[in-house]
Image: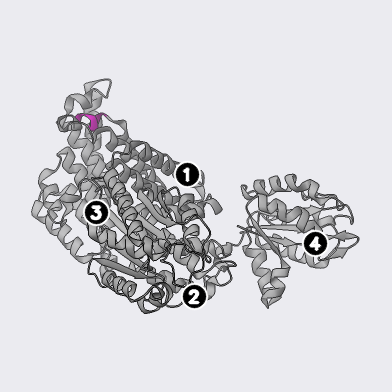
Amino acid sequence: MEAFIVRPFGVKNEIDFDEVEQKLILPALLRAGIKGYTTGKVLEAGNIRQDMFQFLLTSDLVIADISIHNANVFYELGIRHALRAAKTILIRCSKDQVPFDLKTDRYLSYDEAKPELQIDILEESIKQTMNSERPDSPVFLMLPKLKSQNPEYFLAVPADFSKEVFIAHKMKHSGKLALLAAEACFFAWQLPALRMIGDIQFELNLHADAKQTWEIIQKLRPNDTETNERLATIYQRLESHELGQHNYELANKFLAKSELAIKRLFEQFKHLPRDKKAEAFALKARNEKAKWITRWTDVEPEKREREAIRSSFLEDAYKSYSSGYQEDLNHFYSGVNALGLLKTIILLAERKSAVWKSKFETDQKAEYALAEYNNEFDELSVTVRRSLMAKKEALDRDGKANPWVDITYADLTLLTSNNAERVANLYATALELGPHFNYDAALRQLLIYKKLGIMSENVEAALGEFKGGLENEELKIDDEVIMFTGHMIDAEDRKEPRFPKDREAEVRKKIKAAVEAIRKASPEKNFLGISGGACGGDILFLEVCKELGIEMKMYLALPAEKYIVESVQFAGNNWVKRFYELYEDKNTEIDILAETKELPVWLQEKKNYSFWERNNLWLLNTALSFGGRHLNLVAVWDGKGGDGPGGTEHMIKEIKRRGALSEVIQL
């Protein structure tokens, strides 16, 4: 987060405004975790007015010192008040009278002789201001229908950054996307950049990475509709995954987070457009449905139907989906899901009549409720079909296709038709027209029907069209990732030995022992080994993985011919030969960070950041993307600082900061 400081420069009217910034404003911002800068940054940038206007519009916070009658300060403050409704703080000492137009405004007073005495108060004011959406601009207070500008519309993401994101997306490089998200956080344009990456991670089902990206956005924009929608769904998918792994505590944590995100949506409900209101109800319904599934999914098969119809969450989920559909009849996703739950209620109530009747005061009330549900099913199926067909016809007229519409039409037919062959044909057509589309939601719903033994003929016909679908009924156990970092073998002319060549066999033995110990601790897991390809530790680690039959991924900072010159060749031809044996192995997956050691133009503004640091963070983000909390580090380290930035020490510090398990082999 960034703050723009509007103030006079130098000493004016016996006040040293540079000193006020250094002793009061910057320390308070630092404590609040916000970077601060002044028009001094603008003066270096070239076009003063254009950049100044952009900072006044896009900065998360503006602090304006109105101690004296300085024309530039009041001009810039006026621009801020005209563009942004909130998040502007006024400070002053008692030199000049406050102008009439600002007399009613709140401001923080400081002693010009000892400005540092007010650091605590300014820090608290900053925190309260950043956590509040209350307007502080007199313009917006006086003109309540005036709309504040959205600063994100004016933050241009650099073209070469977007190009890197595009390539990473097309190549499905999860680690590169995570790296770019981390790097974007250093720049004023972080929000649009993070949204771009977060959408891609969401699309690629990189749920853990998407969670991290959207949580950064939520911290900056806690009430943002898109952010809370995304996070609610991501938490739901992570909850579903953890349930599949029987990690109930973590699953409940994700469910609670999802409900908090949905709560934020409903707090703004009256301001949402109809489609967003429908989506809010659909998200609420998904959580209620997840609670319903938890009630019966792990019980004995013969008791599942009884527990499923007893749970009140089933009807709660139906009503929420139905409410979403009523908000927007074009939101056919809510409609077909409401229809599916309604069908489930009806079939289970008929099959478990005694259990159904026990939910009511009298048998007559139970029969009446079931009859009403049957009527609702008939009416809802007609309405959903009409809205879905209207969408299909509109797509046909435009010569377009939408896999989501096709699979939803297949879902609708499954619920309303007794023709299993027709059901199978519609699912086959949908899968054929959208081979790269994510059909997980449809498959999960079919598996729910299968577990409950309802609509069996239609369900079996549909599942038969999902190639390998039945194999995915239970989620696979996560892979364990072993990442390596370590020193290169010493060059012949190295003055202070660190990894001398006569210790190669000893170090290799220790690496192998560390890898075997990690594998022994989780014998049921699949393992993946990740490292660079430098002479010394990297190559030894990959050779051990090859020997033990562990899948390998080699991540090179540069193309092979350049990488060899940088990190292999100096150790001799034997290491070059061993590098190519791994590089050319058909079982080794290769990825490359960049063509040259020069940082991208958009990244060069980030101070004290080197190419090799970036390489370390790329490798780490890639490993985290694959393994998440199942990440293990094996390191070969002498316990000292490296020969430059981006060395082994940096990697070990970073991975310990992320909480991964680590085994350090001391040289």
Residue 103's disc number: none
Q: Which x, y percent locates residue 338?
A: 29, 44
Q: Is residue 209 visible?
A: yes
Q: Amino acid at mark 2?
A: Ala
Q: CA distance from mark 1 to mark 2?
A: 36 Å
Classify mark 3: residues with Cα within 10 Å, few (<14), some (14-19) or many (20+).
some
First in sequence: mark 4 vs mark 3 = 4
Instruction: Examine the structure image and report whether residue 308 is included in the region drawn in magenta.
Output: yes
Disc 4 secondary structure class: helix
Instruction: Kindly indicate the quadrant of the structure image that contains residue 361.
Output: top left
Residue 159's disc number: 2
Residue 18's disc number: 4
Disc 3 secondary structure class: helix
Q: CA distance from mark 4 to mark 2?
A: 36 Å
Q: Which x, y percent locates residue 173?
A: 36, 65
Identify the residue position indicated by label 3 in the image. 385
**Labels 3, 1: front one:** 1
Marks 1 and 4 close (CB-CB < 8 Å): no
- Which residues, given as a range, are shown in magenta? 306-310
Q: CA distance from mark 4 to mark 3?
A: 68 Å
**Labels 4, 2: front one:** 4
Identify the residue position indicated by label 1 in the image. 266
Image quarter of the N terminus: bottom right
Q: Amino acid at mark 4?
A: Asp
Left/right placement of residue 106 relative to residue 36 reads: right
Marks 2 and 3 close (CB-CB < 8 Å): no
Q: Amino acid at mark 3?
A: Arg
Q: CA distance from mark 3 to mark 1?
A: 28 Å
